[in-house]
Amino acid sequence: MAWLIALFSGLVFGVGLIAGGMTDPGKVKGFLDVAGAWDPSLALVMAGAIAVGLVAFAQARRQKQAWAGGSIALPASTLIDARLIAGGVLFGIGWGWAGFCPGPAWVAMASGSSAALCFVGAMLAGMLLHDNVWARRAG
Amino acid sequence: MMLDWNAFTPGASFAGGLLIGAAAGLYVLGVGRIAGIAGIVAGALHSVRGRAAGHAVSWVFLIGLALAPWAWRLVAPLPPMRIDVGTAGLIGAGLLVGFGVRMGNGCTSGHGVCGLSRLSLRSLVNVLAFMGAGVATVFVMRHLGLGV
């Protein structure tokens, strides 16, 4: 049951990314280019996602168990520190540079884009570099 | 600031957003997890290396995500993916994205969609950081001519 829901969630998520324009790095850059010819479309992707998300996550707080069984794991951390901000800044630089964030890159890779495959490979390396080298070094 | 009305797709983008929100809602209510792609990918990655348990469901989500462009193609051609950086840029940007989302514990979906939907101040701070950095990067590349 959990797998079926996960498969369907992933599929709907990906279709939403494609429909919304997130899988087109050119459109992402058009959104981030506020000083040029600005395309505000992606703000509407966020607005739509949060409109539904607000209702769903309010329900998630009230609900004792997931439909497939097991607990609902909502993040407990409210910590605002340098890591949170520096991580966001590094991510944002990469996002603005190539126009890909993780979800759309995954979808683009699966569609057969060799450029997206290259990006995802580097992204996985960046994750390992952080988790297995940097985070351990920093303790 | 001037709007690019030809590129603006309010209806499709809002509809896409509704689907993304519905998928994230289904995942948290159905499976009990946050649909943050960075976290899901990292969990799946570490499970391959035997350092994280219970991530079979992450793999299933990622398979569903990977099926999306193929499901789309059954109905219509995929929209264009205009990539304007070379291999070095893809690798550099990919490394930054991978490192940054792990350091900040989330990306556009985990902090952006899920975090803001939970009204998390922590997520809002991260979103402002990556939005600001993204805007600054595009500005430097397009308007100061430092494109790679």
Image (cartoon, rainbow, N blue to C red):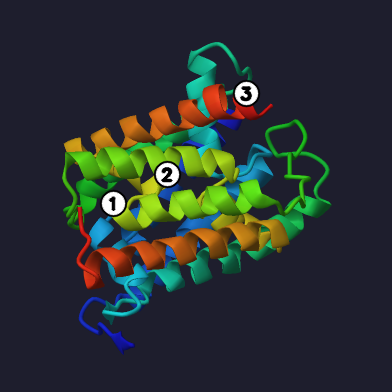
Residue B117: x and y in percent read 65, 61
Query: How many labels were placed on the picture?
Result: 3
- Residue at mark 1: A98
Q: Are marks 1 and 2 in contact (CB under 8 Å)?
A: yes
Side of B80 where A64 appears, left or right: right
Residue bearing mark 3: A136
Residue drawn at point x = 25 percent, y = 63 percent: B141
Q: Chain of mark 1?
A: A
How far is disc 3 from disc 1 in space, using C-alphas? 28 Å
* Relative horizontal placement of residue A38, taking residue B30 as reference (left or right): left
Mark 3 falls on what kind of element?
Answer: helix
Q: Nearer the viewer, residue B137 or B1?
A: B137
N-terminal of the pair, mark 3 or mark 1, is: 1
Q: Are marks 3 and 1 in contact (CB under 8 Å)?
A: no
Percent from the top left, x then y, of residue A33?
32, 72
Mark whose residue sits in front, 3 or 1: 3
Hey, what amino acid is under mark 3? Arg
| Marks 3/2: CA–CA distance | 19 Å
